[in-house]
Image (cartoon, rainbow, N blue to C red):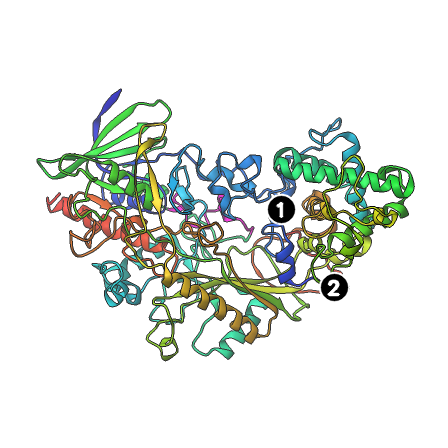
Amino acid sequence: MGTDISRREALKRAAWLLGGTLSAPTILGVLSGCRADQTAGWVPRTLTPHQHDTVEAIADVIIPATETPGARDAGVGRFVDAMFSDYYSAADRRRFLSGLTRVDAQAKRLYGRPFTELSPDQQTAMVSEMDRAAFAELPGTVGHPFRPELVPELRKSDVAAGGGVGASPGDAAMPPAEDIGPQSFFRMMKELAVVGYYTSEIGQTRELRLTPWGAYHDIPYKPGTPAWAG
Amino acid sequence: MLIQQKEEYDAIVVGSGISGGWAAKELTEKGLRTLVLERGRNVEHIKDYVTEHKPDYVFKLRQRRIPPDSPLAKDYQVQARTGQFVEAAVHFFVKDSKHPYKEEKPFTWIQGDQVGGRSLIWGRQTYRWSDLDFEANMRDGHGVDWPIRYKDIAPWYSYVERHAGVSGEKLGLAHLPDGEFQHPMELNAGEKWVKAGIEREFPGRHVTIGRAAVLTEPIGDRLPCHFCGPCYRGCRTGSYFSSQSSTLPAARKTGKLTLRPHSLTREVLYDEKSNRASGVRFVDTQTGETHDVFAKVIFLCASTLGTTRILLNSKSSHFPNGLGNSSGVVGQYLMDHHFIVGAGGDVPGLLDHYYEGNRPNGFYIPRFRNLADPASDKLTFVRGYGYQGGAGRMNWGRGAVQPGIGVELKKKLHDAGPWTASMTAFGECLPRKENHAWLDADQKDEWGIPILRIDCSWGPNELAMREDMRVQATEMLLAAGCTNVESFDGNKPGGLGAEPGLGIHEMGTACMGRDPKTSALNANNQLHDVPNVFVTDGACMASSACQNPSITYMALTARAADFAVGELQRRNL
């Protein structure tokens, strides 16, 4: 299974969206019949259609379809649109959308196409790199993998240019400061993908399971048994 | 326009929460025609539990916690400071924009605004006080001596526990007396492991299941808990104690209850000739009309600061500083429990153990400090604290905070994660005059009632205690065998994080005492100055102890109601 994160580190990194869901159960229950955003002809309120498609594509790389449906099937795109319409502040929305723009800029730089038009391998390569950078230390901190001396200055990327700082061609491949570490766009993206998937009906009833009610007691556990969704 | 109500009641109760519900039950059951004035809207048992039993995926925002900078928190800027402010519970919190106050230093005043008050959303932890707590002010000189002792309240603890229903484990500890318990809920495998380790390495310390006002056995038509999880959404089986599930139905059964929501009490009306309160003046918040209503006995149960605000606003020539405030202490000695300090860590192994059900409870470590024990001699603080905590297996959320994507991530999150454990302490706050509330000279709310100003901060004793809370939690988890143990202390002096009020156990400001010159209430919760006015909510508390206070409010209310009815019968009121 690979090692898991320690509780200490998990809490250090968890933002508001994850509050209470790291180890406390979320709510489980029977269907009440009232579903959100399952209607045909749904249009996003805040994301443009292209932004929605890009978000879904990224989320589907993070949590792909396997024997169970993935993030796209679970409607993560609609969830993200709802969150930026109703939940997040304007500042957080701006930060996310500018990050999304940088994704397309990087895709064009590397492969000549926007992210949604890349091949699965190309998308996976990009998302892997974003994931790595998002969990790297911030520039200037001990152990930071990007040597600050290569970058004359770390400044906010020009959104139109799609990021990249410094003078040398090699720097174009280096993520801007906004895409490194805890405050990065991809941290937010990944949280949204994970929360969006595992609080969806597919995530909670097909990939994981709802705990039965009635009593609270110890039960034995074997690896491969689905965890409770909450 | 002022409407004088023709109908006179035997009793008026202001507030319908933990204390008000009990006053309503006791007074009506003893034969008094009782009017309960609730400032907020009606919430009907079962019918109005609109988010109960719904899975995450039917919520627009999948049942997230709402942060203060969210557009959804626009009217709830103070309420959004608490972790309890989640999508499924927003409708049970007050709109701060509607009920503002001023905080001179950060003070987070969490309030309900509905029938049942915070009894709908409380944490349900219930722990008796002992004489260690009732004698504390006398022994160390902080605050004023309680005019009662454990023997005065013990039968009333039993009385309210039997009706409310409290589950827990008997420990035989003098300083945390056992209650009338239903059988306790279970600790899970991780908690049993932590318990064994702590009790082995620290003989004399105990780790027990939380004592909770959640049924494990039926009471009347209330059913035992079915472990669905979030009590705060309301419970159709009546399994946790709330006014809706427990006290108001009992009051209604008598036929003597009149419950009036949307009724915001402005002041208690005082008749100087008889030296009695004649009744209450309230605003109907739906019509804007002011009403005067009259009764022989008044119970103020509007929550600590709500009650004190009413007293301070009840001015007359005899009481220029507010009703019952000849001493000047009304508004003083505001307290809360300080918390968000402790430790957490990973629990090795136990990977072949899991649990089923969502238990609305955790473990509790009773106070082990300043029990006249030798180990406490070198401590730099007085009084004490307990811990609330738990263990569990990390769930899918951990995927968002570590590297890894794709099939590998999905496979990992499919399984239950490793075990972790954590605990936070709840600490006693000394009663200090400087922690106080008063009416603003200028700003009024939309009904013309002056808003409250609150000046409250932690003192040196609280801060010294926090250091010990943090260190002891760390040492206990390390000694039990946890790895990657890290302590935390959320307090940011002058800022938000573990500020006063956040504990949602605010108490004091109209405290009981022996001397009318230094306290507001006597041993029967009567205003020293005006014997037919009773205060039995958190305002009456002369000290804070470290135990969750609601069961003590229930017991004091039932006791005071019994006394009040007796006084009426003896024609003293």
User: Residue at horizontal 78%, vertical 54%?
Assistant: A132
x, y percent for residue B103? 39, 43
**Dot 1 surroundings within 10 Å: few (below 14), some, or many (20 or more)?**
many
Residue B120 lies in the magenta-colored region: no
Mark 2 secondary-structure assignment: loop
Determine which of the numbered discs, if any, sits on residue A17 in the image.
1
> Which callout, 2 or 1, points at the residue further toward the start of the chain?
1
Q: Mark 2 lies on which chain?
A: A
- Element type where label 1 sits in the image: helix
Q: Which chain carries label 1?
A: A
- Kindly tell me whether residue B446 is visible in this rendering: yes
Q: In the rendered view, does B488 fall on the left or right side of A4?
A: left
- Tell which of B318 and B146 is nearer to you: B318
Name the amino acid, label 1.
Answer: Leu
Q: Categorize mark 2 by other alpha carbons within 10 Å: few (<14), some (14-19), many (20+).
A: few
Image: magenta residue range: B228-246
Residue at 73% over, 28% down: A42
> Where's residue B380, x and y in %?
37, 70
A55 horizontally vs B488: left or right? right
What residue did someone put label 2 on? Answer: A223
> What amino acid is found at the position of numbered circle 2 in the picture?
Pro
Vertical relation: A36 (above or below) A152? above
Can you see residue A63? no
Q: In this view, does A57 lie to the left or right of B557?
A: right
